Image: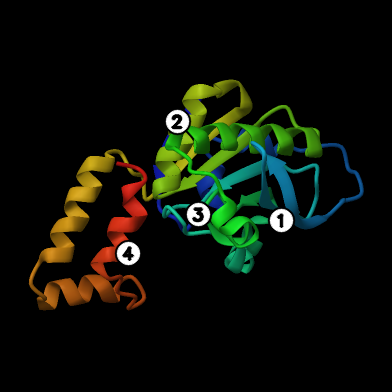
Amino acid sequence: MQLTSDRFSLTRRAFTGGLSALLVARPVMAATPIDEQGFVSIGGVDQWIAVQGSDVQNPVILYLHGGPGEAQSPFLKDFEPWLKDFTVVNWDQRGAGKTYEKNGASMPAFTLDRLVEDAVLVSEHARKKLGKKKLILVGQSAGSMLGLLVAKRRPDLFYACVGTAQMVSVEASAKWQEEMIHAKPTHALLNLGDRHDGVHFPGELFHDRLGGLR
């Protein structure tokens, strides 16, 4: 099991080191593209999954979004550069994106352990659907922590676990964010916000999004 850390802006070059063995020359066959989106019953709940790629023969990435709640369903175009070399599986987790839109208030309460088990079930669904022995797990921010827990529970399902904006301590991250919420506005803090595309979240939203992981 290979555990690495990298920024969100993954490139093909970032994979050619540790994952080059997955991209070795294969017998020439006609490419079979895939572009499917829809709901799959995962853990008794209909959850939204997208499977996209230029050739189903390529290695498969399961992408775990961050947040909690930062679903990638509105941003599938951002993954287009990956689709030449990989089939990418995006999944809106419980309480996020299209999965939340479909289930709303009927969604039962859930824990981090439930998300881990969901991710295992999504992995097994993707393996079966695409005929793969193993997947590549990529987690962003809170998804990187989820990815480590998933890989620890079922290392047999994955070639590698890649963390971007790796979260290593929920308590330390929550403490830092609380400090930022209550800090007096300064030029440095405003610049910090600008580096995040100028989006400023109110303290209540930070608290709500992190509360489920404490």
Which of the two discs, 2 and 4, sits closer to the camera? Answer: 4
Asked whether, in this view, residue 164 is left or right of residue 91, the answer is: left
Q: Which mark is residue 84?
A: 1
Q: Residues within 10 Å of mark 3 (few under 14, many from 20)?
A: some
For the residue pair 165 and 122, the one nearer the viewer reads as 122
Quadrant position of residue 202: bottom left
Query: How many numbered marks does the figure carry?
Result: 4
**Earlier along the polypeptide chain: callout 1 or callout 2?**
1
Q: Which residue is mark 2?
A: 149
Q: Residues within 10 Å of mark 1 (few under 14, many from 20)?
A: some
For the residue pair 100 and 3, the one nearer the viewer reads as 100
Between the residue at mark 1 and the residue at mark 2, the CA separation in whole angstroms equals 29 Å
Q: Secondary structure at mark 4?
A: helix
Report if the CB atoms under discs 1 and 4 are less than 8 Å apart: no
**Earlier along the polypeptide chain: callout 3 or callout 4?**
3
Report if the CB atoms under discs 2 and 4 are less than 8 Å apart: no
Residue 104 shows up from this direction: yes
Q: Secondary structure at mark 2?
A: helix
Residue type highlighted by circle 2: Leu
**Earlier along the polypeptide chain: callout 1 or callout 3?**
3
For the residue pair 142 and 98, the one nearer the viewer reads as 98
Q: Which residue is mark 3?
A: 10
Between the residue at mark 3 and the residue at mark 4, the CA separation in whole angstroms equals 28 Å
Q: Residue at coordinates 88% horizontally, 43% vertically from top-left?
A: 28
Q: Residue at coordinates 27% horizontally, 39% vertically from top-left?
A: 169
Where residue 8 sits: x, y (%)?
A: 45, 55
Residue type highlighted by circle 3: Leu
Residue 143 against residue 101 in the figure, above or below: above
Q: Quadrant of the C terminus?
A: top left
**Earlier along the polypeptide chain: callout 2 or callout 4?**
2
Q: Which mark is residue 205?
A: 4
Q: Secondary structure at mark 1?
A: loop
